[in-house]
Amino acid sequence: MTSRFDLRRMGMALSAPVLAIIVAVLVTSAILVAAGDPVGEVWGTILSVPRPRVVVAIINAAIVYYISAVAVAIGFRMNLFNIGVDGQYRIAAFAAAVVAGEGWLPGPLNILLGLVVAMLAGGLWAGIAGLLKVYRGVSEVISTIMLNAIATVLVAFLLRKVAPQTGSNIVSTKPLPESSHVSGLPLIPGVSREVYGLIILAVLIGVVYWFILGKTRFGFDLRATGRSESAAVASGVKVKRMVLMSMILSGVVAGLVGMPLLFGQDYAYGTTFQPGLGFAGIAIALLGRNHPVGIVFAAFLWAFLDQQSNALQITAGVSDRLVLIIQGVIVLSVVIAYEVIRRLNVRIEQRRVAQALATQAADVKEGAPA
């Protein structure tokens, strides 16, 4: 009985993202038809088997997306909308690049120092939004959006101050020492490009996220507060402290978003550093339903669409921006699909409980003395 119940729950959980993807395909196809674009060629390009170098690009993009989505998911589990992951990872990546670029410590120790600085910077920047919410009642949505804008301007200002004067239009921090570069992993044969060595960091973050949320008192309090704040207060949970700690923890993880890029690809923070990773994390966390495994699949789907869209302009004569429509429709569809599945699940549960009570009442009646 329990096994069938778990299988049913698993099936219901998988139904929402599958339904969302089907809806996204149908809606996007309708848009293509309305615009007079070749529907078959577009989907043929997007769904074609990627070449080995594209596979590596998909994995690398998924690594960064995964960390970003976990940072967002920590807030989501607490009913906190940390929209500020983008600003937090910018501040953190810049701080880590400046400190690690000095090369005060040798090799791996310098990398570790950079990671610690990134976590501290991300956590402190997110903590501002947490303090504003706890002590002034400021919505974290508003404060984190404002902090994103401040972070962008602040980092651009500081970057001009610390960047070496090279005469180039590309401005960046001092390059990391070669001993602080994290070597890639040749996981895909037949291609010179390698997977980020800090894929290990993403795996570690996923395991720690699963453990803290599922196996610790802190995780239980966090989930309980997210489901019902009044019930959490009644059971002795200090909600204000949980809000502040959740925001800081989310910022700590957000601080690590740019680390695979910094130590495995760019080796400096500059004007070409990849933007928009925080906003992608919001959509991926929603799609993955804040589950550490679900986020893995969502991150790979997001990265797959991103990389496969690069060939749209050449093969189908359609702008690669089309994939943004697909991703947007997926996010919208997944929110609707989850609500539909949730209501269906509640109805099934109510029916199951009613049948069980009816059976129990019938048994009592049959066993009663005449």
Image (cartoon, rainbow, N blue to C red):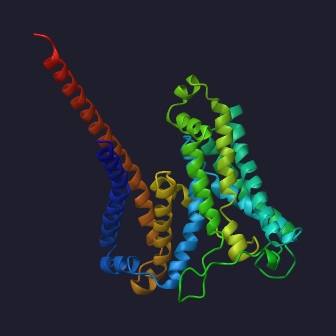
- Left or right: where does residue 339 sit relative to residue 208? left
Closest to the observer: 208 or 56?
A: 208
Where residue 114 appears, as percent x and y from the top left, is 78, 64
The part of the image, by quadrant, that contains residue 24 is: bottom left
Relative vertical location of residue 284 with respect to residue 300 in this rendering, above or below: above
Q: Is residue 71 visible to the viewer in this orientation of the structure?
A: no
Residue 321 drawn at (x, y percent): 48, 72
Left or right of 227 in this view: 150: right
Quarter of the image for residue 234 reads top right
Going by the image, does 57 lie left or right of 87?
A: left
In the picture, measured across the screen, residue 275 lies left or right of residue 270, that is left
Quadrant position of the C terminus in the picture: top left
Foreground pick, 161 / 82: 82
**Label total for image:** 0
Q: Residue at x 43, y 71 (%)?
A: 322
- Residue at the farthest left position: 370
Q: In this picture, is 315 found above or below 30?
A: below
**Is residue 82 at all visible to an observer of this figure?**
yes
The extreme right residue here reads 104
Query: What residue appears at the point 32 percent right and 62 percent down from the top-left corner?
Result: 22
Residue 327 location (% of width, % of height): 45, 64
Q: Residue at x 54, y 55 (%)?
A: 282
Q: Quadrant of the N terminus?
A: top left
Front residue of 17/84: it is: 17
* Picture layout, residue 169 above or below residue 278: below
The x, y position of residue 250, in whole percent, is 64, 49
